[in-house]
Amino acid sequence: MANNESQIVHSTRNEFVDNVKQWVTLDSQLKIVNEKTRIMREAKGTLNGKICSFINDNNMNHKHVEISDGTLKFYKRNEYKPLTYAYLEKSLHDIIPNVKHVEHILQHLKENREVVVHDDIRRNYSK
């Protein structure tokens, strides 16, 4: 019986080691892909800025350009800043004159935020 238990523990340990090796391999591959993606996004952002400047400088807003597989449309896009406690506090002070009420509301929001806990793995690279 002890031999059987030893085999199960050994098998489980081997599976664990294999899973760690696979995880590290995938993490390394993702690091490379993410770095390439970051570089491509930066290059695309730079080109986007140059193209949009040309469009704005030449009054070509709301125009489009035909490309091989469709069209490029140029438009203005609204982007909202994140909802932060600093913004909430400022806005609440604008509409609620009582500072204590504002502090109470903010304290309530901070203390009652939903927290979700997940198990995860973090890789630290040696220098």
Image (spheres, grey):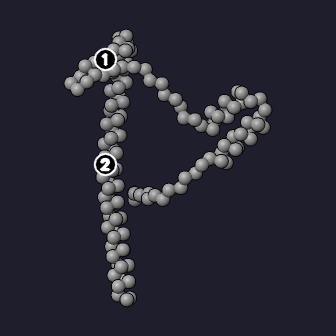
| The quarter of the displayed image where residue 126 is located | bottom left
Within 10 angstroms of label 2, few (less than 14), some, or many (20 or more) residues?
few
- At x 37%, y 15%, the residue is 62
| The quarter of the displayed image where residue 28 is located | bottom left
* Rendered location of residue 17, percent (x, y): 34, 69
- At x 35%, y 34%, the residue is 42
| Residue 3 vertical placement versus 117 (above, below) | below
* Rendered location of residue 6, percent (x, y): 36, 83
Q: Amino acid at mark 1?
A: His
Horizontal side of 68 relative to 27 (left or right) equals: left
Of labels 2 and 1, the one closer to you: 1
Marks 2 and 1, the one that precedes in the sequence: 2
Horizontal side of 117 relative to 62 (left or right) equals: right
Q: Which residue is mark 1?
A: 64
| Residue 7 vertical placement versus 124 (above, below) | below
Per the image, label 2 sits on a secondary structure element best described as helix
* Rendered location of residue 83, percent (x, y): 58, 35
Cα distance in 3D space between marks 2 and 1: 35 Å
Q: Which residue occupies the extreme top position in the image?
A: 59
Horizontal side of 66 relative to 49 (left or right) equals: left
Q: Nearer the viewer, residue 1 or 112?
A: 1
Tag on residue 10?
Answer: none
Q: Amino acid at mark 2?
A: Ile
Classify the position of the N terminus by image quarter.
bottom left
* Rendered location of residue 117, percent (x, y): 53, 55
Q: Which residue occupies the extreme front position in the image?
A: 1
Per the image, label 1 sits on a secondary structure element best described as strand
Q: Which residue is mark 2?
A: 32
Q: Nearer the viewer, residue 58 or 116?
A: 116
- At x 28%, y 18%, the residue is 65
